[in-house]
Amino acid sequence: MGQIEWAMWANEQALASGLILITGGIVATTGRFAQWYFGAYSIVAGVFVCLLEYPRGKRRKGSTMERCGQKYMAAVVKLFGPLTRNYYVRATLHLLLAVPAGFLLATILGTVCLAIASGIYLLAAIRGEQWMPIEPKPKERPQVEAIKQPPSNPPPRPPVEARKKPSEEEEAEAAAAGGGPQVNPVPVTDEVV
Amino acid sequence: MKTGLMTALAMARASARCLNFNSMLILVPVCRNLLSFLRGTCSFCSRTLRKPLDHNLTFHKLVAYMICIFTAIHITAHLFNFERYSRSQQATDVSLASILSSLSRNEKAEDSWLNPIQSPNMTVMYVTFTSIAGLTGVIGTIALILMVTSAMEFIRRNYFELFWITHHLFIIYFLCLALHGISGIVRGQMKESMDESHPHKCAQSFEKWDDHDSGCRHPRFKGSPPEVVMHPSKVLELQMIKQGFHMEVGQYIFVKCPSISHLEWHPFTLTSAPEEDFFSIHIRAAGNWTENLIRAFEQQHSPVPRIKVDGPFGTVSEDVFQYEVAVLVGAGIGVTPFASILKSIWYKFQRGDHNLKTQKIYFYWICRETGAFAWFNDLLISLEQEMEELGKVGFLNYHLFLTGWDSNIAGHAALNFDKATDILTGLKQKTYFGRPKWDNEFSTIATAHPKSVVGVFLCGPPTLAKNLRKCCHQYSSMDPRKVQFYFNKENF
């Protein structure tokens, strides 16, 4: 149990609460319920919470699965520095956002869920967790070796060692000869029997 | 209901049904022992049958998604319902919705409401958190949401204990689901009321519901208050309707009135006939509870107290209808079951029921004074009138014996000997004073019906029972084809 990162669960819970706030807000506003302006607030708060919580933080141990397309929001969230990194701030922010939606029955479920998420974030903050953005790992490029020229002589080719010794002269000759007549390194007898 | 809520109610109920079904299904694929058992016993089944067992977790997740979807639909539909209820409660114009909402105020009874928002001051929030349905709904949904968020793939793979422990919230979810419908907020119009004032016929004429002449009356829903009739000598008659209540003649019920005492159940014999569409009891003031009850019902201004009924119990005295000639003897309080029997016999006779073998009834009513049974008196008078109208005066032959007489009453009776109706009871039959002479009665009956089987039914004291039994034996002839008296002491 000591390995649990509460912030991860709080993140899921807060995302779900954001969606619930949006749904409740839509129901209240389209139905023009009594005090429906709370519903309008709830939609706005829900969208904000969803955007804030969408980028998943980096786990302390092990690899973290990114959410699809989260790098754009992650960049925005990273901009705010300590405000978004610190979970105490997030906990209070969520609690404050949740309160006004509690006045309307249609959105009260969102309030309760967001309050629970705020509580879990508080727990995470007490245990010293922080929101770290998921940095893309720099791709380890392989050592750039000298590009080998392709062999200039057609097969059958002698193994590399046979070519290596008088390599400079042979190479110079071979390069000079270019596409000239083939110089067989091993005497070839053309015996017709 | 439909005017106020339209489609939202149907949506809520439909999604509720689906929720019930899915909640039932969701536990099945995770019963590991059950699945192992099935795999074991299904070894002779084909492989294709066992294949789905391997995908049990996928099925579990699918059903969980469906539960989430239906929960969302159900909550949204009910939000609309509550909002509409609230609006119709607050509507000040005269519309069908506002009249239906104020049913409880008009009937002055605590329990005849249709709109659960009973006063304009109640808000939807208040109703949600003070009703069992609202509270269990909110708590169950929160448990569901917590279970779902901790079961997300990411959390499950990386922090399994969190998922496992949180998922045990399903116990709370199921508990809330079970308790959710327990208070019966959604009410149907009762069947009798539907026959009388069907919504198709009466929905438009709601302004005239208060007039007695119009064809439609206030619709009665489950939980309607009883009709109260006060009789002289502090006798209270309660006529009640209960869904699914079926009685036979001579049965009794237990009655409790929570506003008087939460623990006391008192038995009362049913005085209505099974052919009537209500059931009734007559309550006489004979102790603390009955006096309090009568006083509570007498008050005009406070709401009618709620009654709980248990029953009916008791012997079914159907035998009464099997005898050609029935001799019914009711002594004192024992006359009460005969009210039911007489009414029932009368209805059967009127409708020409072929199962009714009874051709003649001799009814002996013995009591100290008629005061407490004035209502039974009225019943006999009305039966007398109806028989005259039908031209069957000879069907019911009754005799009233007053055993608590004094010389004053006797003198009075003697003076008015020539009057057509009896001065004490108003019945055509004159009242006798003293106890009946059974020998005379039995010999008269035996002579009048020489070849019949006569059933003698008594509800009264044991000494009288001994007496009557003796007479039955004495006056039954030795010849089985001639008159035979059969004695039945009923423990009503």
Image (cartoon, helix red, strand yellow):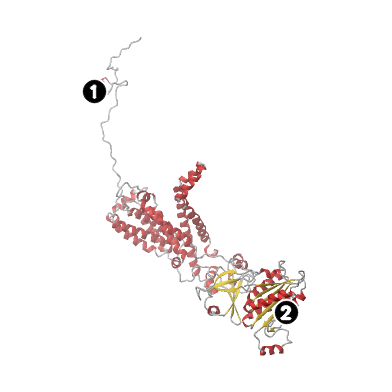
Instruction: Answer left or right for B419 relative to B161.
Output: right
Type of amino acid under label 1: Lys
Which residue lies at the image location 46% right of the left edge and 46% below the top edge?
B55
Q: Which of B351 and B446 is in front in this view?
A: B446
Type of amino acid under label 2: Asp
The mark tally for this picture is: 2
Tell me whether circle 2 and circle 1 mark residues in contact (CB < 8 Å).
Answer: no
Q: Where is residue B338 in the image (x, y as percent from the top left)?
A: 65, 74
**In this figure, which residue is indicated by the disc labeled 1?**
A164
Quarter holding the C terminus of chain A?
top left
Q: Which of B144 and B2 is in front in this view?
A: B144
Q: Nearer the viewer, residue B85 or B40?
A: B40
Q: Where is residue B403 in the image (x, y as percent from the top left)?
A: 66, 84
Determine whether the residue tagged by mark 1 lies in a helix, strand or loop: helix
Q: Where is residue A148 in the image (x, y as percent from the top left)?
A: 27, 29
Q: Position of residue B461 (x, y in %)?
A: 63, 77
Labelled disc at residue B439: 2
Same chain under badges 2 and 1? The reply is no
